[in-house]
Image (tube, grey):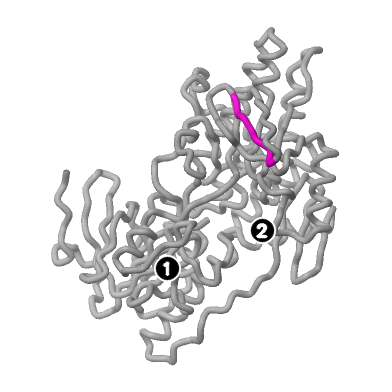
Amino acid sequence: MPTPASSADTPPLTAASHRPRVVVIGAGFGGLAAVRGLRHAPVEVTVVDRTNHHLFQPLVYQVATGLLSPGEIAPALRKILRRQHNTAVLLAEATDVDLTDRHIQVLEADGTTRAIGYDYLVVAAGSHDSYFGHDDWAEHLYPMKTLTEALGLRDQILRAYERATECGDPAGRARWTTFVIVGAGPTGVEIAGQLVALTRELREELHRDDSSPARIILIDALSEVLSTFPPTLRAHAHQRLTAMGVQILLDTRADAVDAAGITVKATDGHTERIDTHTVIWAAGVHASPLAATLAHAAGIDIDHKGRVPVQRNCSLTGHPEVFVIGDMANLHDLPGLSAPAIQEGRYVAKVLHHRTVGKPTPGPFTYRDRGTMATISARDAIADIYGVKLHGRLGKLAWAAVHISFLVGWGNRVGVLARWAFLLGSRTRSERVILTSIHADHAGPAHSPSGPTADR
């Protein structure tokens, strides 16, 4: 195994060594917000990420269902930051942090490791899927945290219909066209709605008299879909999904998952076996392992979600030069959504800018909750914006406007708008290429490399 370089051996990151070095781990919503917020600061920034792109995670399910292409929601980091001359991008994985000597350990693409020194560190390494103690299920599940996983799910859905077309056994056909989604939060609800539309389109192309509608099942251990939304919007979403043909099983949790299906168990003890080749995971997440590393080094404990408790200015206890934001941080128990991560990233950039130019430090971080939203179908969404509750077409307009505004780059915004308009007019999807082998269904889901995603 290569010997890691010491911080003294680390090549200088900048030509202007007198400038403070800011290292940002993760280029998700929080990390990218921090990097962009430092564009005019007298610092040298290095952003470290395992991938070369910034992923707009709220629309990953639209890649998984053939509506959008990967490039439309994942612009390259170097392109985003091409005019930010105080910033360098390093394609590598941060594996350790030395809080005493102030350097991070990174694993580069060629397998070598080295240390990178910092004056300030912003950790936004995000989270990964949590299977609630059943990691053995992972090989049979289709999560959607990364582009690799989204494309793997898309392949599985398309391949399932190819297999159903050739299957002469009605039970076998039903197994291929049954899709179970675990988790009835925004991601689960949104993938269910898109699956209804996609499977309807695929069924029309089968040209078989014996083809039947797909069975789409949404399960959750809680008693409501979208449990964090107001009751009226939860009720609207439940009613619309049911009308679209989605079977909703509440107060029900996954009990066992294997290659042939899933066993679910209700709170009253009733169990049911569902035969399927496609179980989609949209349930819990756990903070990056880097959070536990940081907490241990700082002598503090992580919470039950693996997050690091931070100070009111997002800094690590005892280390004012280290900031933790996004899915990794527990600050007032804020939800792991894009809005808190972005606001934290911008706030930390402001703190660092003020420190480096000698301005007074900003006050404690304050989160401004602008509301929540989720889409149900092409013409229906729900939104709670500053207490104003919208659903139907008004909700859809609000949902679309917010998501377009959060996308990075005008090219991506125009491209996504064009795709949505085309879908409304034609009701067809152009992203229908199966990338994996036709025999891939025997190997189970194709997951991305191990490790967390940046806060998406």
The stretch in magenta equals 261-267
State which quarter of the image contains the N terminus: top left
Q: Is residue 373 left or right of residue 309?
A: right
Can you tell which quarter of the image residue 279 is in?
top right
Q: Name the mark on residue 4.
A: none
Question: Which element carries disc 2, helix, strand or loop?
Answer: helix
Residue carrying label 2? 404
Q: Is residue 84 left or right of residue 221?
A: left
Along the line of sight, the residue nearer the viewer: 149 or 353: 149
Mark 1 crowd level (few <14, some 14–19, many ≥20, 10 Å Cα): many
Distance Cα–Cα, label 1 vs label 2: 27 Å
Question: Which element carries disc 1, helix, strand or loop?
Answer: strand
Along the line of sight, the residue nearer the viewer: 91 or 335: 335
Would residue 391 be counted in the magenta stretch? no
Along the line of sight, the residue nearer the viewer: 409 or 104: 104
Query: Is residue 40 shown above or below 215?
Result: below
Q: Residue at x 56, y 60 (%)?
A: 336
Can you tell which quarter of the image residue 402 is in?
bottom right
Would residue 266 be counted in the magenta stretch? yes
What residue type is disc 2 on? Ile
Relative image position of residue 296 (x, y in whole percent): 32, 63
Residue carrying label 1? 324
